[in-house]
Amino acid sequence: MKPNQHYQNVKDSYLFYHIAQKTKAYLEAHPDQKLYRMGIGDVSLPLAPCVIAALHEGVEDQATKANFHGYMPECGAAFLRKAIAKHYQKRGVMLNDDEVFVSSGASDELGDLLGIFDTNQTVMILEPAYPAYVDANLMRGNTIIHRNAGLDNGFLPMPDRSQKADIIYICSPNNPTGAVYSAAQLKEWVDYANDIGAVIFFDAAYEAFIEDPDLPHSIFEIEGARTCAIEICSLSKTAGFTGTRCGYTILPKTLEREGMNLHAMWVRNRTTTTNGISYILQKGAAAVFSDEGQRQVAELIAVYKNNAKVLMAALDQLGIRYFGGVNAPYIWLQCPNGMDSWSIFDLLLNEIQVVGTPGEGFGPCGEGYFRFSTFGDPEDTKVAAQRILDLLSK
Ligand code: PLP
């Protein structure tokens, strides 16, 4: 047996695991302290009432012979695929129901989708980035081109035609910077990908946080995307499904490379390597796309947006420059007083028990920045904002 040698190229500790270890050590040394967690982007509010009702219904169905469901279709229940396609239609994106694949979340898909690509691919990652992009590709032995986002490009790097890649990861709204591509900017990426034969992995996990009506929620709002893009989406942040687990991927039937149809390949992959998502979860997920579901999840999102306002007000008072927080649930701030990002992590943890995420964890160009998640408990967020104000205005 020969283990996958590429694992030797992956850093020992995943960013959020490292943060969890540091906070655990702090709590062991200070058992009486309460932490204000604004590090990992995990939600703090319970599921919407209509989702809970649908989950209960699903459980009741499983209790009767008439309504019981066994194995579900591998690519997703017809009722959920239809509900998601209809949701896209409201934005003017026409999809066939079977271009929607129900998943157990975006993380799983971001790694699993690589299974329909050859090994030794060249992958372009726009950094700072969600760390799983880099790690999933290193594990497969792919070559990574790191493109830096920063102040010079408004955290929105644009294609450089001198560079070639097989796969391009675009996350918009971006984790961690909160930057969102405009339709015109995405059109440039789509044209570039079509010209060089690349496939875009468009991570739309945070699309529900977009407020600006002119910003695109889906890459399929852009002409030409059906021949170059796969969209990976999740109910984790849209509807509080981080622990419930359900997402979806849009892979158009028109996506082909070298005479092979990627949609057909993904169907082949799913029907081999999964047995679908539980009926009960898909019932709950479908409720999110009902009119009432959309209203209720918008209420949850409004709570997180208020957290963002509380944190941004504190940063404004301190004169700290930051990005995001409006069309995205993350605030990306410049580390104050010339500190590096792990030093401010340690300072906030040790002095005021506030946990954020060091920018360096999202790639070297994230050094000098720090990320706050706005998914925390509203009362905790208020206390944390006050503590940040008190500490940093000293
Ligand atoms: N993509 C991005 C950019 C994320 O930030 C996250 C989670 O934080 C995910 C994907 C994973 O989402 P899921 O919970 O659906 O696996």
Image (cartoon, rainbow, N blue to C red):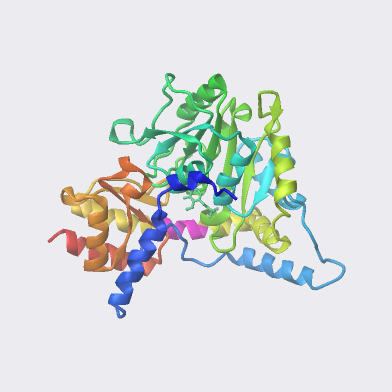
Q: What count of labels does the image hold?
A: 0
Taking 32 as reference, is 39 above or below it?
above
For the question of whether residue 350 can be seen, the reply is yes
In the rendered image, residue 366, in percent from the top left (x then y), is placed at: 31, 44
In the rendered image, residue 94, in percent from the top left (x then y), is placed at: 68, 35
* Magenta stretch bounds: 299-305
Q: Residue sitting at 63 percent across and 27 percent down?
A: 227
Q: Depth check: give the residue in front, 199 or 389.
A: 199
In the rendered image, residue 1, in percent from the top left (x then y), is placed at: 60, 50
Q: Residue sitting at 32 percent across and 42 percent down?
A: 364
Toward the bottom, the furthest residue is 32
For the question of whether residue 211 can be seen, the reply is no
Left or right, 316 with reference to 128: left
Q: Residue sitting at 64 percent across and 45 percent down?
A: 87
* Quadrant of image for the C terminus: bottom left
Left or right, 17 with reference to 314: right
In the rendered image, residue 99, in percent from the top left (x then y), is placed at: 70, 39
Taking 332 as reference, is 198 above or below it?
above
Q: Residue sitting at 71 percent across and 46 percent down?
A: 270
What's the magenta bit mostly, secondary-structure-wise?
Answer: helix
Q: Depth check: give the residue in front, 390 or 155.
A: 155
Q: Is residue 304 magenta?
A: yes
Q: Is residue 17 magenta?
A: no
Left or right, 277 with reference to 206: right
Q: Depth check: give the residue in front, 269 or 104.
A: 269
